[in-house]
Image (tube, rainbow, N blue to C red):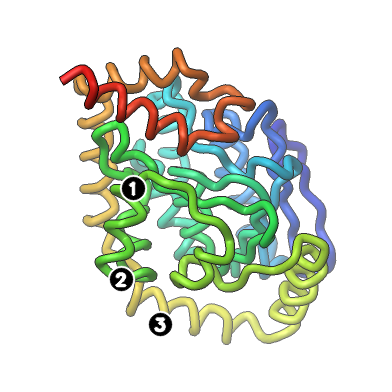
Amino acid sequence: MPFETLNVNKERAVLFAEIAAPPMNLLGPELVRDLVSLIQEAEADDAISVLVFKSADKEYFISHVDVTRIAEYREQAAKLAGEPSLGLLFRRLSTSRLVTIAQIEGRARAAGNEFALACDMRFAARETAIFSQFEPAFGQLPGAGGAQHLARLLGRGRAIEVMLSAGDYDADLAERYGWINRALPAGELDSFVKALAHRISGFPAAGQLAVKDRINAITLAPVEDFRRDSDLFGEAVRTPEAQSRIQAAMKRGFQTRGAELALARMLAEQGGDRVMRR
């Protein structure tokens, strides 16, 4: 499986996909294209039952979408989702026969967090993992399932807190909130996830499929809700207010590796500047 932005390794019934899209694992059309192809090829291989996603970059799992290429990555998402929607693509991942695990080191923000939420399980490095759903800082609703998943996992109050604060949440707090399965020491994360993936893959595929089908029936929001959030994001991102905030953030270093290490502070400072000008 040759990919531009993924390093793939198969171990018996487990496929490990390492995200490698420098300089900061932005979710652009190349990465979306490769994710679509990976899911299609893995699902077509009956010998694969578990798919693990991790990052080659210890500071960024997936940073967020490339806001300068929204139409392009949506076009790639449509090749599997059937519609130009990242949210529907991620929901398609949730309903896959494959058991999916996100092994998170570094920043998983906005669509990066939504991708992790679409996976069946999430395990994060205590020292380095950071989670955020910051779209409301630009006047937008998360468009790829963030509101749907967070409300169900965290509850109403905490989901509103996470989204409206646009803040960074470390792995320990994410674990306490129910955002992730477990926070583990970075030195133990890889061996833990690998052992779990192989353990799961050793059991009958029929049991995996039955469990996922029933859990999804109970907890996964309907397609219509994902589609509505995707449409609302697409509408909001084109407004003058959103574009003004995006351009202001770009001038501060948004979508650059160094500046986004402290993205939460950047967003707070940008919000404070606007308040001062009123």
Give amino acid for label 1: Ser
Helix, strand or loop at mark 2: loop
Identify residue for label 1.
Answer: 165
Q: Quadrant of residue 141?
A: top left
> Which comes sooner in the sequence, label 1 or label 3?
1
Amino acid type at mark 2: Gly
| Neighbourhood count class around disc 2 (C-alpha, 10 Å): few under 14, some 14–19, many 20 upward | few
Q: Residues within 10 Å of mark 1 (few under 14, many from 20)?
A: some
Residue 203 percent coordinates (x, y) = 70, 86
- Which amino acid is tagged 3? Arg
x, y (%) of residue 159?
32, 61
Is residue 81 visible in the rendered image? The answer is no
**Residue 275: x percent and y percent?**
22, 26
**Which residue corresponds to the image point at 71% horizontal and 40% vertical from the top-left?**
6
The residue closer to the viewer here, 175 or 100, is: 175
**Picture disc at residue 155:** 2
Tag 2–tag 1 contact (CB < 8 Å):
no
Q: Earlier in the sequence, mark 3 or mark 2?
A: 2
- State the count of labels: 3
- Residue 214 - label: 3
